[in-house]
Amino acid sequence: MTPLIAMLLCFAAYTVAYKVYAKFLANHVFELSPDRETPAHTLRDDVDYMPTNRFVLFGHHYASITGLAPMLGPAIAV
């Protein structure tokens, strides 16, 4: 078996397992529902909890994870 075939088989197996396990987690473990309100809506105080656009939220989340928040925050504020 060539390495390319092995890589493609592993990638296919990983993709199928990811889809199946993600669906299991969403439906049975976390019981996700698009109708459920987030804490931004239920605990809204316009200081700590405010609903926002998902793309803005993703940008803030990514900046926090990468450690850019101390530099990126003031740069955006300017």
Image (spheres, rainbow, N blue to C red):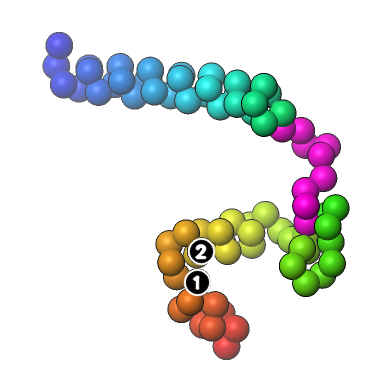
Our reading of the magenta stretch's main secondary structure is: loop
The answer to the question of whether label 2 and label 1 lie on touching residues, with beta carbons closer than 8 A, is yes
Q: Would you name the residue on which mark 1 appears?
A: 69
Q: Element type at marker 1? A: helix
Q: Amino acid at mark 2?
A: Ser
Report which quarter residue 55 is drawn in: bottom right
Q: Amino acid at mark 1?
A: Ala
Quarter of the picture containing the N terminus is top left
Q: Is residue 59 above or below residue 47?
A: above
Percent of width and height locating residue 4: 20, 22
Q: Residue furthest left?
A: 2
Q: Would you name the residue on which mark 2 appears?
A: 64
Instruction: Measure how far apart labels 2 and 1 are at the Cα level.
Output: 5 Å
Check disc 1: other Cα within 10 Å, few if <14, some if 14-19, many if 20+: some
Q: Is residue 71 above or below residue 14?
A: below
Q: Is residue 38 left or right of residue 16?
A: right
- Residue, x 68% and y 23% (percent of image)? 27
- Residue, x 60% and y 83% (percent of image)? 77
- Residue, x 72% and y 32% (percent of image)? 32
Percent of width and height locating residue 63: 50, 64
Q: Which residues are magenta?
A: 32-40
